[in-house]
Image: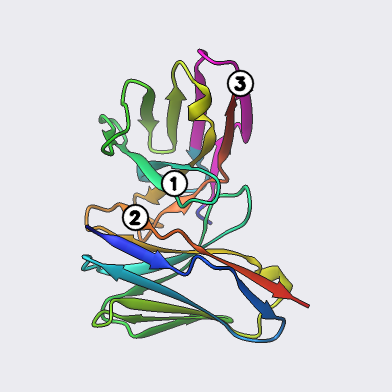
Amino acid sequence: SQKIEQNSEALNIQEGKTATLTCNYTNYSPAYLQWYRQDPGRGPVFLLLIRENEKEKRKERLKVTFDTTLKQSLFHITASQPADSATYLCALDDSWGKLQFGAGTQVVVTP
Amino acid sequence: GAVVSQHPSWVICKSGTSVKIECRSLDFQATTMFWYRQFPKQSLMLMATSNEGSKATYEQGVEKDKFLINHASLTLSTLTVTSAHPEDSSFYICSARGHQIYTDTQYFGPGTRLTVL
């Protein structure tokens, strides 16, 4: 069965450091992979989309890599700030236009 | 851009009543809208996909007679939880994919917290 795995343990990180989150998937052949941010009691906010033929994508302090051989995406937040504290969700398109989400990884950035 | 609103943001109702939740794309037309449910500490689970002017497609295990979806226009979809029970208490989130712009992904509303007493 299809599975998307994200680290369930919260990532505690000091302000200014780089946070790295992992998304692994099985039994998917996604055309692209997406990352969302979700704050408590709010809907997800779209951050980045990376296509299968792209190795890396950047947006301001965010960087995403996509390795279709390893079936893995890494999400980096550089120079992290307390305002980056949230849950980050990985999502894959199942080719029917529907998104399947991982459970998310909570990031806590302390001053 | 790509703003999606939901109304109400929260609702408390008695068991057995019906509740309607609206999802609107404010600055774009949406070909497709999606409805998700999220329980505490869990990820989003897709309930159904709706296209304007046609019947919604429900995911396995989702009762279509209980969760009525109407996608009346390219900017409005509604989810009605009929005869709500406490186990229907959850966070309901809609998303929209654009028709001519914002076609690359889904843009989410802020969610509706439903509590059934």
Identify the residue shown where x is 44% and y is 49%. Answer: B44
Q: Pointer 3: what residue?
A: B117
Residue B17 among magenta residues: yes
State which quadrant residue B71 falls in: top left
Subunit bearing disc 1: B
Q: Which residue occupies the extreme right position in the image?
A: A111
Measuring from the top left, give residue A10's x and y in whole percent: 58, 68
Measuring from the top left, give residue B42's x and y in whole percent: 49, 51
What colour scheme has been applied to the protein in the rendered image? Answer: rainbow
Task: Mark 2: give few (<14), some (14-19) or many (20+) Cα within 10 Å.
Answer: many
Residue A64 versus residue B70: which sits nearer the camera? A64
State which quadrant residue B36 falls in: top left
Between label 1 and label 2, give the one nearer the viewer: 2
The secondary structure type at the circle numbered 1 is strand
Subunit bearing disc 2: A
Q: Pointer 1: what residue?
A: B95
Between label 3 and label 1, give the one nearer the viewer: 3
Q: Amino acid at mark 1?
A: Ser
The residue range painted magenta reads: B3-23
The secondary structure type at the circle numbered 3 is loop
Vertical placement of residue B31 versus A13, above or below = above
Measuring from the top left, give residue B99's x and y in whole percent: 34, 49
Q: Amino acid at mark 3?
A: Leu
Measuring from the top left, give residue A47's x and y in whole percent: 50, 67
Work out whether disc 3 and disc 1 sit on a shared chain: yes
Direction from residue A29 to residue A99 in the image, left or right: right
